[in-house]
Amino acid sequence: MFDRFEEIRTFVAVVEAKGFKRAADRMGLVKSAVSRRIRDLEDRLGTRLFNRTTRGISLTGAGEAFYERGRKLLADLSEAEDQVSAGAQAAVGRLRVSAPVSFTVHCVAPVMHDFISRHPRLQVHIEENDRLVDIVSEGYDMAIRISRLKDSTLIQRRISTIRHVCCASPAYLDKHGRPRTPDDVRAHQGVAYGHVEPSRYWMFRDDVSVEARSTLVMNNGDALCAAAIAGCGLVIVPTFIAHRAIERGELEVVLDDHAREPVALYAVYPSSSHPPAKLRLFVDFLVARFGREPFWDEAIGGRKRKRARS
């Protein structure tokens, strides 16, 4: 007989994903397997859990009651397993993480070998997405976010400091001049970031917002950096994206004295009296790797000090 806990896990996943197909994608299954598990569960219980229409699914009264009890049962099981594994300092199971695309590529992916080699029984699913996901309803264990976080029911743990720089290619600046004050930005071409309002993107110290003429808008920090290197104009990007191009001389920082205030990198996850060991160990790992002055800022700082001595 199929594991009853797996049936319940599948049912909870369908509810939280709001659909069979999305639940199947999250669980790494085909849709037909998820449908079969739900059908077998309903047959075993002798009641319908979902109302199915051409427009989607919704819970029946029995389904709502079973979801609340099933979710608590899975949480209690996870906590019981975790208390044992935590005592052995082991992380087991699957950890589903949402993280910004560029931060994952530049910072998280290069250090993951160290983490997974320490915890070979843990499977980490990192889904790169610059969209602000709903951790609970979309089934994530945690998210990595770069922001001034608002009050939230989520637990927030600070990982590191994120600084932004305004920069452009030396060739562009030689041709169009180097801005000395934020007001000078108005006379320049720029590449804007599509996930935020222009007034927020072109933000400098003391909340001064002065927009460049953005004839190009892109939705990824690496794309912004590449466009700036190619001479498209000014960009404002995090130093973890730009530092190598700055070190190589492909980008030049301007208006450094007017840089916006740093923000923080956070790990956020649902409130719990006993966070799973796999989550705690991963967040501790990120803090240990990036918690002091991050390597990308050390590199830029070293280049500035070197220029000052020369």
Image (tube, helix red, strand yellow):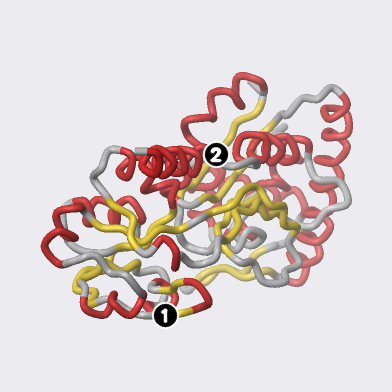
- Left or right: residue 302 compared with residue 229: right
The CA span between labels 1 and 2 is 38 Å
Question: Residue flagged by tag 1: what amino acid is it?
Answer: Ser
Which residue is found at the position 69% from the left and 44% from the top? 7
Q: Position of residue 153 (x, y in %)?
A: 76, 67
**Going 72% across and 71% down the picture, which residue do you hit?**
151
Dot 1 surroundings within 10 Å: few (below 14), some, or many (20 or more)? some
Q: Residue 122 lies in what quarter of the image?
A: top right
Dot label at residue 125: 2
Q: Which mark is residue 209?
A: 1
State the residue in front, 275 or 194.
Answer: 194
Task: Classify mark 2: residues with Cα within 10 Å, few (<14), some (14-19) or many (20+).
Answer: some
Q: For this rendering, which residue is in front, 27 or 48?
A: 27
Residue 43's label in the rendered image is: none
Above-or-below relation of 187 to 26: below
Horizontal side of 72 relative to 11 (left or right) equals right
> Relative to 288, does residue 204 appear above or below in the rendering?
below
Residue type at mark 2?
Answer: His
Task: Give the mark, 1 or 2, whose residue is nearer the N terminus.
Answer: 2
Q: Quadrant of residue 52?
A: bottom right
- Judge left or right: residue 78 versus residue 175: right
